[in-house]
Amino acid sequence: MTEPARHLEAVPAPDAERERLAAVRRYRILDTPPDATFDTIASLAARSCDAPIATVAIVDGDRIWFKATHGLEGVSQIDREPGLCASAILRDTPYVVTDALTDPRTAANPLVHGGLGVRFYAAAPITTADGHRLGTVNVLDTRPRDVSEEQLAILADLAALVAQELERRLSSICTITAERTMRTGAERLVRTLQRTLLPPALPKVPGLDAAAAYHPVSPDEVGGDFYDLFPLDDGRWAFFLGDVCGKGAEAAALTSLTRYTLRAAAIYEPDPCAVLGNLDAVLKGEYQSDPRFCTALVGVLAPEPDGSFAVTLAGGGHPPALAVRADGTVEAVETPGGQLIGILPEPRFAQADVRLAPGDALLLYTDGLTEARAPDGTMLGDEGLTAHLTSTPFEGADNLLANVHKLLTELGAGVSDDTALLAFSVPRRPEPSGQEPSR
């Protein structure tokens, strides 16, 4: 049997107490919500010692905070001084008070003389791997009594379980924190990498409004969608939009190669079909053992004297561009027969011509848009996109993209792939004074 020490407990050394309190903070346990694991330990402590009250207590600087209690309803903490648990953490071995009313260590304790009327107390310290005693697993009774060595051993085992659970919990917190830090860093890296694969801003085209947008599905994965707009030497403008296979770093490398190949090819020979043929040859040469492919639309914008723009467009396996007319009608600019780029032996690339008059717009998009699904599982598709554009008036390229981006946002989780958008619009001519603007 453990005999109670018949002397007043020593005050903890300041340096040791500072280190102990630092350990308490390190485990991030104070003021956390109830936890079934610790509640079970308190219950087991009470049953094993046949005691009406048990707690899992953490000793803070000026309070005793209860992580779990049994038979002590409505109490979450008490003052530290004078305190039973505050004395118990000064010892490596179990701390026992068989009669708190006559024991000089506790005779003046308010828990003894207060409404609770504690007469018996037994505790085992919760000791960390580096030797800091954070608190106790303890039992209390309102009558003087004794405790067996076996019961004290059980309290010590339960205190060890609490220490192990605190270690496991801290390890989980540190792992989650590290993962969040890594995720934040990865997301920052992805955003930076994604920005390098897209132009920082579209250039200003005289007589034409241009806008672009990128709608990523995942913030931590680089997508393979791309677009660009740039001037040619003869006053015309070249543009492209497309989508490479895959995600992540490999897709980023393929996107970078594709984008710069298209740009260089268009500057060298601004014929859209020739540009796609050049890209096809480069991809086949670069990925001979592991073929990679992409889809793309490549076009050339030529300003006309009347303010309109003539557009020559070539497609390789990509969804058609949509011409949104000033009267609200929508026409698909088909490039029939245009095949995937980089994977077929002798692919064909098809070309189409379209004119954009004042008030008209041209929308290019990747298939993340039309493959998005409504909450009922219905795919948006070409018809759904056309219906949306027909029913949604727009004023300029920016407004057109805002309407499409709103559609993507409304579809929410139904959007399963990244989407790139590129739009051009020819400003309307000013209406004669006194007349209402027409659609």
Image: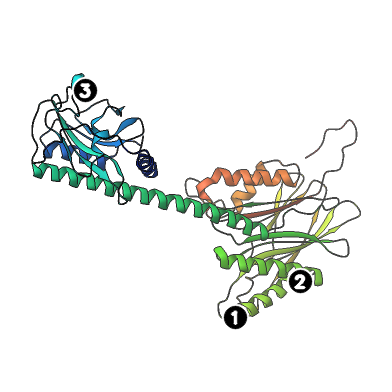
Question: Circle 3 is placed at which residue position?
Answer: 108
Q: CA distance from mark 3 to mark 2?
A: 91 Å
**Which structural element holds mark 1?**
loop
On residue 265, the disc is 2
| Res. 154 visible in picture | yes
* Residue at the (90%, 52%) spot, across then down: 306
Residue type at mark 2? Ala
Residue 233, given in percent of the width and then of the height, sits at 87, 65
Q: Is 274 situated above or below 192? A: below
Residue type at mark 1? Gln
Quarter-wise, where is residue 402 in the image?
Answer: top right
Question: Circle 1 is placed at which residue position?
Answer: 288
- Sooner in the amino-acid sequence: mark 1 or mark 3: 3
Quarter-wise, where is residue 297 in the image?
Answer: bottom right
Residue 27, given in percent of the width and then of the height, sits at 36, 44
Q: CA distance from mark 1 to mark 3?
A: 87 Å
Which of discs 3 and 2 lies nearer the camera? The answer is 3
| Res. 245 visible in picture | no
